[in-house]
Image (cartoon, rainbow, N blue to C red):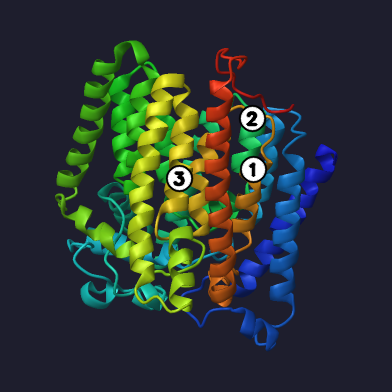
Amino acid sequence: MPRPFLVRYTGLAGSLLLAVAAWLGGASSPWEPTVTPRTILAGQNGVVLPLAWLAGTGLLVAAWVLGRRRVPSVRWAFVTAALWAVPLLPVLPLGSYDVYSYACQGWQQSAGFDPYSGGVDLLGCPWADAVAPTWRSSPAPYGPVFLVLAAVAVKLGGSLTGAVVLLRVIAVAGVAVIGWCLRGDKEAVFLVLASPLVLVHLVSGAHNEAVMVALIMAGLAMRRSMLMMGVLLGLAVGVKATAIVVIPFAVLFFPGRFRRAVTMIGGGATAALVAVSLGSGLGLGWIAGLTGSGVSVQWTAPSTAIGMTLEMIGVPGAVAVTRVLGMAALVVVLLLLWVRALRKGDPLLHAGLALAATVLLAPVFHPWYAIWPLALLAATPWRDTLWLVAPCAVAGVLCLPDGYNLALATKAQGAVVMTALAGYLAWKVLHEAKQTDRDRRRPDADHGGDRRPRREA
């Protein structure tokens, strides 16, 4: 196993190289034609940019994956993650142009417009040319909590640069809160805070996942106050509606006071969400704005990949159908996970699995979505975390410096491979379920208590 010193400074070298890539080809204002595999092969981006991105990503991912088993202390994990984050702070955002969309939505909110009624092409924004063309006509797909934060960043920042800086400060603060919630587990701190996904997409890209996940983690940590747990989870829903899948599992932290937990947590979440919705002047119209997030069609979402594969073999309109089926399957999986958590306990584990199922079965997947379950599942005890870090490592290399998703360059191949993988996983789950059922029916089966595996030191 690599020594902690080697892990720390291998990752730092990767972060420094990614900072070079961000300086040369990060998401800039105004928007420029995207760096793609074709422009790289044509030599339009020079040699340093692609090499810095490739080497930096490789070193950072390798240091994270190999170093996860040998974390000396919580302090070492915090310091290492901070060292890896620092080079990314003074350069252009990496991984997407979304932070500029945030700035424009914040400007619209602060100017008294309704960001849910149209995009920058309709409502306007002084920095509209920084928004990626794909999203210029899209209304805000985020909740009122985040729009209020974005409006504050715009007001205090006074310019696009100032707004982006403050949005990054908000994201880094969210990452710090996540770290505080994990501070009792050195491996969990390293797994989350030093993750390439967190460094590239939260610290550098300033995605609002940082705020949503921070509120979820802080809410679930509030075991002494059901009401405060509900308020924080409600605020998380007010950032991104995805957080709502965690709330049913939160009530299971109080098995002896189930009815009271439902009332207090559900009431706190509802009150917080309504208060922010009305206080922001947006009312509940933001719920309708959530429907615009499915415009992206990529094979990285299994349900979409299956539809793309079917359309390639001549089935028209398959993507729309498989996406609906994926959402129906998600409802079933979430219900089964909740029932299992009710029977066997461990609501934190099942809440993390619920977020993982949401990521896998939703119609759209972006690499930073993998951070949702990562933060919760990293805090649960497992023998090995390879199953968790492997998909996150793959997701960490999907985006080129200014946000081009490599999935776009491999549409046909990726759709077929993802469809085959989804089929294998479905078969594996069914096979394991049948095997478990047969084992339970054996007269000599061990019916001892459920034991959670432990992560290796």
Distance Cα–Cα, label 2 vs label 1? 10 Å
In the figure, 322 relative to 4: above or below? Answer: below
Secondary structure of residue under mark 3 = helix
What number is the disc on residue 357?
A: 3
Q: Which residue carries the number 1 mark?
A: 387
Residue type indicated by callout 1 = Trp
- Residue 188 occupies which quadrant of the picture? top right
Residue 323 in view: yes
- The Cα–Cα distance between marks 1 and 3, rounded to whole angstroms, is 14 Å
- Disc 1, SS: helix
Mark 3 closeness class: few <14, some 14–19, many ≥20 residues within 10 Å? some
Question: What percent of the width, then of the height, locates residue 61?
Answer: 70, 53
- Type of the residue with mark 2: Trp
Q: Are marks 2 and 1 in contact (CB under 8 Å)?
A: yes
Disc 2 designates what residue? 382
Residue 257: x %, y % from top left: 30, 12
Tell me what residue is drawn at x 33 percent, y 18 percent.
225
Residue at 66%, 69% (x, y): give it: 21
The mark nearer the N terminus, 3 or 2, is 3
Residue 73 percent across, percent down from the top left: 72, 28
* Upstream in sequence: badge 2 or badge 1: 2
Q: Residues within 10 Å of mark 1 (few under 14, many from 20)?
A: few
Residue ID at (60%, 51%): 392
Identify the amino acid type marked 3: Ala
